[in-house]
Amino acid sequence: MNKVITKALALLLLALSLPAFAALEVAGVKFDDKAKVGAGETVINGAGMRGVLFIKAYAMAMYLPQKAATAAEALAMKGAKRVRIVLLRDTSGETFADALPNGIRKNHSEQEVAALNARIEALKATMLAITTTPKGATIHFDWLPEVGGGVTRLSINGEKKGDDLVGEDFYRAVLKIWLGDKPVQDDLKEHLLGKPAS
C-alpha cells in the first residue's frame, strides 16, 4: 500500500514539475502549445475569445519566442511572433477592414498613425478584397524578422493574402489592437497575457 502511495505521489510531483505549456482550448478551438513561424520557434502565451454583445466572433491565441506577462514585454520581445485567429462565425472582409484599422488608430497618436497609414490602407485593401471568410477559417498575422528586414504577413488557411508589410513598428501596431492601452476587449487582452479575466 505504501508503495502505491509513494508511486502516486511521485507521479503527481512529476506532473507538477512539467513545463506549463499545455495546449489551450477556447470556445471549442484547440490551440497548439508551440508553433513554427517562419524560421522561428514560438510558444503559446495565452488565448481567449472575442465576443460582440452575445455573438462569439473568434477565438485567438498569441505566440511568442518565450512567455510574456505584460503587454510591454510582448511588444518589445524580439523574434518571430504570431496572432492566430479562428473564426466562430462567417465573417466578411469588410468587417475586418473596418475593425483592424480602427483598432490600430485607437492605440496610436496622430503622428504615429501618419507613419503607419500607407500600411494600414494596404492591409485594409487586402481585407476588402476578401468577400466572406467562413466559420472555422484560420487567420494568421505573422511577424517574420528574417524576411526582407522584417515583415508582417497575413494568411488565411495557410494561403498568403496581400503584400508583406515591412517594419516591426507595423507588427507592434497590429498587436496593440489587442494589447494596447485601448484594447478591443479588456478581458481578451488579459487572456492573451496568460492571466484570468478580472
Image: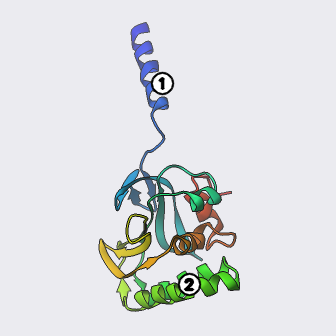
Q: Quick one: label 2 or label 1, which is nearer the N terminus? A: 1
In the picture as drawn, the residue positioned furthest to the front comes out as: 149
Which numbered disc covers residue 55? Answer: none
**Does residue 65 lie above or below 88 as drawn?**
above
What is the quadrant of the C terminus in the image?
bottom right
Q: Residue at x 44, y 55 (%)?
A: 25
Visible residue check, residue 1: no
Vertical position of residue 96 compared to residue 32: above or below: below
Residue type of the residue flagged with mark 1: Leu
Whole-percent x and y of residue 91? 42, 83
Colour option used: rainbow
Q: Is residue 159 above or below residue 43?
A: below
The residue at the point 64 percent across, 59 percent down is: 72
Task: Tell whether 163 sits left or right of 186.
Answer: left
User: 177 or 163, which lies in front?
Assistant: 163
- Examine the image and state in which quarter residue 175 appears: bottom right
Residue depicted at 53% across the width and 81% down the height = 100
What residue is shown with label 2?
101
Q: Nearer the viewer, mark 2 or mark 1?
A: 2
| Image spot of residue 52 (x, y percent) | 57, 77
Per the rendering, the mark at residue 13 is 1
Packing grade of label 1 (10 A; few <14, some 14-19, many >=20) is few
Q: Quadrant of the N terminus?
A: top left
Q: Secondary structure at mark 1?
A: helix
Badge 2 marks a residue whose secondary structure is: helix
Q: Return the x and y of residue 187 as percentages of the image width and height.
A: 63, 63
Q: Residues within 10 Å of mark 2 (few under 14, many from 20)?
A: many
Amino acid on which the number 2 mark rests in the picture = Pro
Asked if residue 92 can be seen in this view, the reply is: yes
Q: Which percent across, then down, holds residue 135?
A: 37, 76
Q: Is residue 174 left or right of residue 148?
A: right
